[in-house]
Image (tube, helix red, strand yellow):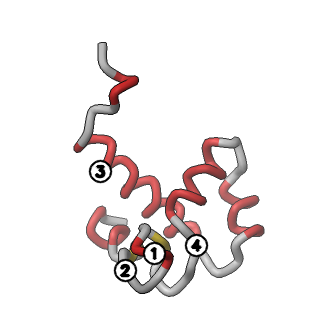
Amino acid sequence: MQTQELLRRVSIDPKICHGKACIKGTRVLVSLILDNLAEGLSIQQILHEYPTIAKEDIQASLEYAAILAKEEILPFAKA
């Protein structure tokens, strides 16, 4: 799936989840998906815990995070 197609799965709406990035049509935050991946949960475990999302939504969350990571140097990541 192309980047633009994946990113259409992410929604940022001030009326939903206080404007935080979430999966379109749900209230599942992108950050929640990323936290689960960081904790070592498998894609299958995440899909089981959040049945309203699809594998492509997890891919979209990773794509969204990758784009954000390219835009900002975090203070603790400076050499």
Give me the residue at 50% from left, 68% from top. Answer: 56
- Left or right, residue 18 beside residue 5: right
Q: CA distance from mark 4 to mark 1?
A: 12 Å
Q: Nearer the viewer, mark 3 or mark 4?
A: 4
Disc nearer the start of the sequence (3/2): 2
* Classed neighbour count for the residue bearing mark 1: other residues with Cα under 10 Å, few (<14), some (14–19), many (≥20): few
Identify which amino acid the numbered label 1 is placed on: His
Tag 4 secondary structure: loop
Tag 3 secondary structure: helix
Q: Nearer the viewer, mark 1 or mark 3?
A: 1
Q: Are marks 2 and 1 in contact (CB under 8 Å)?
A: yes
Q: Is residue 47 above or below residue 15?
A: above
Q: Are marks 3 and 2 in contact (CB under 8 Å)?
A: no
Quadrant in the rendering for residue 48: bottom right
Q: Is residue 58 above or below residue 35?
A: below
Query: Disc 4 marks which residue?
Result: 28
Which numbered disc covers residue 72? none
Tag 2 secondary structure: loop
Query: Disc 2 marks which residue?
Result: 14
Tag 1 secondary structure: helix
> Where does the image place residue 71, in percent across and percent down from the top left?
23, 44
Query: Disc 1 marks which residue?
Result: 18
Q: Is residue 33 above or below residue 70?
A: below
Q: CA distance from mark 2 to mark 1?
A: 5 Å
Identify which amino acid the numbered label 3 is placed on: Ile
Quadrant in the rendering for residue 63: bottom left
Query: Disc 3 marks which residue?
Result: 67
